[in-house]
């Protein structure tokens, strides 16, 4: 059996209907897991569940507001009832958005904390309780962001929430080390999700002179992040807990084509 | 298609001729199991030959090249032989290391320099030699084995811990420098590894085994020391396309050991 195999596992992926969450859901299904996708928007969830079934796995789409404790508990309960157990929880829901720094209200701040940090905490604890009851151990993977390590200009609440998630990961990892539950974090850098692409933030992979930008100087695709999430769910990472895996390219090095070409000539 | 698949790739493992339970040997075996042609590099020809024999018996394609990684010329020769025999070089695992436990007050200049030479200089010379070929080839994965000592420091391990910290930093610089050449450079920082002949501490073998048994009985697996297999698993990850989106990073593989270091 491959050390990267998820055969027979049941995973929950919040925010699993789009972006990085959807990529993780499909990567898990490809690795052999049955997947429960949970998010607010029912339509995209059903589409994701259909894709997972298309890969020959069981799937469940559960419309959930992950900032509501009752709904999170209901998600875990339904997963356990219909899929038999929960082995892997990926707390991926979230998103950045906030007014200009000088205009941020307490409500804006708290909304960001709720969406990005409280939601993950609720999912982690609810899933962790189920894993402890099962006695099988499990894997919890929180999707943070490089914003939580460095910063995200203009999004102080988002960055603080993502930093909080890293701290929370360590606390849970230690609390549940004795339960065989590994809790880790993935911190993606700039990633070319569909939303980012549509907003026009992803540059062309071909430079003005027709040369291709090397992959490590392009933003990551959601699949790159998903592969790291597979590792953290798989037997290969059984001795890894409480850690943060940063998933980013050297995209910032490609800021100027001409500077970069000069640098390449200089270093040859 | 499986992104973790490594079949038919070519890897060099430095320090690949270690002891029976040594990490280098276990990494080489895990790569060979995954279908990789493995080049074992190390100082002791007899050790290399014994690991090579074992791998070949399992049907792996193995080459062993005596190499002192502290000598840039020998590193260049290692890569040249690899490419001549196997046609390519996809993966370099910088595993060669030497540990030394001496009270810093008693450490000699020679001991300091020898440790830095293997644990830091050797990593750079091997990476440089491999990257010179990987640049031409247009791709490559370099996996450095550092240590959690390089993150948290370690009692009586001054040159070792300092060199391992430097390897973590070197990983970042090489990743930045070689991203344009499509070379991923990442690092694994193992915590304590418990194997019967891992006699770094000078603790007698039977005492070490007693300690291990105590830990096994009294701690859940995640709080116990790791095994070389845990490190090999992380190597398989970083050597594969599954890690294509990561470069310059260090993954500690140390169970929940970090908690005592930071609390």
Image (tube, coloured by chain):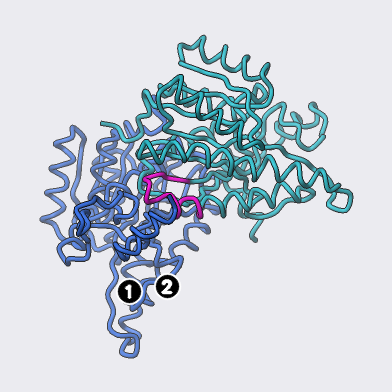
Chain colours: A blue, B cyan
- Magenta span has B173? yes
Q: Position of residue B151 (x, y in %)?
A: 62, 54
Q: Position of residue A3 (x, y in %)?
A: 42, 31
Q: Position of residue A201 (x, y in %)?
A: 22, 65
Single out the mark in the foreground, 1 or 2: 2
Residue farthest bottom in this picture:
A102
From the image, tell me which residue sits under label 2. A160
From the image, tell me which residue sits under label 1. A112
Could you tell me which residue is drawn at 43 percent across and 30 percent down? B89
Can residue B1 be seen here? The reply is: yes
Element on which disc 1 rests: helix
Could you tell me which residue is drawn at 29 percent across and 62 percent down? A257
Pointer 1 with pointer 2, Cβ within 8 A: yes
Residue A102 marker: none
Q: Quarter of the image for the N terminus of chain B: give it.
A: top left
Q: Position of residue B46 (x, y in %)?
A: 68, 16
Q: Quarter of the image for the C terminus of chain B: give it.
A: bottom right
Total number of numbered discs in the rendering: 2
| Range drawn in magenta | B172-185
Q: Which is more toward the observer, B108 or A143? A: B108
């Amino acid at each position: 059996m491959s050390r990267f195999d998820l055969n027979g596992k049941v995973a929950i992926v919040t925010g699993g209907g789009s972006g990085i969450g959807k990529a993780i859901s499909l990567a898990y299904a490809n690795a052999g897991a049955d997947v429960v996708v949970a998010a607010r928007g029912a339509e995209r969830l059903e589409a994701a569940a259909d894709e997972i079934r298309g890969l020959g796995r069981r799937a469940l789409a559960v419309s959930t507001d992950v900032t509501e404790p009752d709904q999170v508990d209901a998600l875990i309960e339904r997963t356990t009832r219909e899929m038999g157990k929960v082995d892997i929880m990926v707390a991926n829901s979230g998103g950045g958005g906030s007014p200009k720094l000088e205009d941020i209200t307490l409500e804006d701040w708290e909304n960001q904390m709720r969406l990005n940090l409280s939601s993950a905490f609720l999912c982690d604890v609810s899933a962790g309780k189920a894993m402890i009851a099962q006695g099988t151990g499990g894997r919890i993977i929180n999707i943070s962001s490089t914003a939580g390590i460095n910063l995200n200009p203009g999004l102080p609440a988002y960055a603080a929430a993502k930093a909080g998630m890293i701290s929370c990961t360590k606390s849970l990892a230690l609390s549940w080390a004795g339960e065989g539950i590994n809790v880790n974090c993935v911190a993606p850098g700039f990633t070319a999700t569909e939303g980012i692409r549509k907003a026009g933030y992803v540059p062309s992979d071909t430079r003005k002179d027709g040369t291709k930008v090397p992959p490590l100087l392009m933003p990551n695709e959601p699949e790159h992040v998903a592969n790291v999430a597979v590792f953290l769910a798989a037997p290969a990472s059984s001795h890894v807990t409480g850690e943060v895996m940063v998933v980013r390219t050297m995209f910032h090095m490609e800021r100027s084509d001409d500077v970069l070409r000069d640098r390449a000539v200089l270093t040859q | 298609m499986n992104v973790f698949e490594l079949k038919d790739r070519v890897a060099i493992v430095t320090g690949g001729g270690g002891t029976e339970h040594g990490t280098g040997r276990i990494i080489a075996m895990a790569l060979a199991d995954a279908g990789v042609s493995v080049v074992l590099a190390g100082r002791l020809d007899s050790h290399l030959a014994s690991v090579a024999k074992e791998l070949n018996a399992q049907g792996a394609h193995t080459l062993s090249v005596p190499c002192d990684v502290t000598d840039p010329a020998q590193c260049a020769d290692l890569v040249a032989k690899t490419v001549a025999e196997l046609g390519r070089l996809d993966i370099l695992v910088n595993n060669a290391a030497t540990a030394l436990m001496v009270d810093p007050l008693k450490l000699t200049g020679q001991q300091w320099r020898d440790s830095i030479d293997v644990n830091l200089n050797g990593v750079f010379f091997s990476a440089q030699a491999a990257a010179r070929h990987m640049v031409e080839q247009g791709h490559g994965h370099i996996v450095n084995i550092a240590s959690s000592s390089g993150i948290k420091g370690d009692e009586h391990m001054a040159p070792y811990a300092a060199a391992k910290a430097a390897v973590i930093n070197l990983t970042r610089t090489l990743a930045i420098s070689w991203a344009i050449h499509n070379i991923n450079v990442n690092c694994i920082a193992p915590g304590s590894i418990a194997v019967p002949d891992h006699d770094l501490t000078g603790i007698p073998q039977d005492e070490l085994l007693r300690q291990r048994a105590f830990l096994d009985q009294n701690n859940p697996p995640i709080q116990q020391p790791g095994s070389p297999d845990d490190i090999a698993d992380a190597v398989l990850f970083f050597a594969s396309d599954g890690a294509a989106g990561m470069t310059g990073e260090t993954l500690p593989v140390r169970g929940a050991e970090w908690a005592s270091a930071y609390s």
